[in-house]
Amino acid sequence: MRIGHGYDVHRLVEGRKLILGGVEIPYEKGLDGHSDADVLVHALMDAMLGALALGDIGQHFPDTDPEYKDADSLKLLDKVCEIIDDSDYVFSNADMTICCQSPKLAPYIMDMRCKIAETIGCDIDQISIKATTEERLGFTGEGLGISATAVVLLEEL
């Protein structure tokens, strides 16, 4: 077995869509970034790459490359899945947490789980997503940004 951990954070800004787990969330702000800035999918990809000791998404999809400007993170996740498919490992499961004071994410978590499971090609019960506030503490608690963590287990074929 191989375990990977991922973390990502982006600032909330006006004039951007809020995309989390491949789902557009109605909100007055969105996440700032070169791609769609989907912190949940970015943390997941970093965990998957980390499990194979293959670096992070910045190495595979640099923000200096115009090809990835406004990129759909689920399409980048598909490319990371191809890397795993070419390895001696198979995706087992992922457990993820989104830290976000606002908006409330509970109504969207099942859609996020479905989109991620569909992209990876796994059962929905292999994808766990939780959301938490930080009790108004720190940059996420103050509503300045959103962060996400992910832990992934890959099993040897």
Image (spheres, helix red, strand yellow):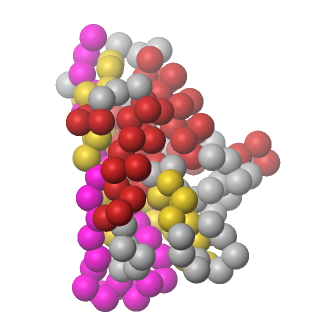
The span shown in magenta is: 129-157
Tell me which residue sits at (49%, 23%) in the image. Answer: 83
Q: Nearer the viewer, residue 40 or 25?
A: 25
Q: Is residue 147 visible?
A: yes
Q: Is 39 inside the magenta-drawn segment?
A: no
Reply above or below: 118 against 140: above
- Whether residue 156 sits left or right of residue 20 in the image: it is left
Q: Nearer the viewer, residue 20 or 91?
A: 20
Q: Nearer the viewer, residue 7 or 133?
A: 133
Reply above or below: 142 against 86: below
Q: Is residue 46 visible?
A: no
- Whether residue 126 sits left or right of residue 55 in the image: it is left
Quadrant occupied by the N terminus: top left
Tell me which residue sits at (67%, 58%) in the image. Answer: 34
The x, y position of residue 133, in whole percent, is 29, 76
The x, y position of residue 25, in whole percent, is 51, 65
> Which residue reaches farthest right?
66
Quadrant occupied by the C terminus: top left
> Which residue reaches farthest front?
107
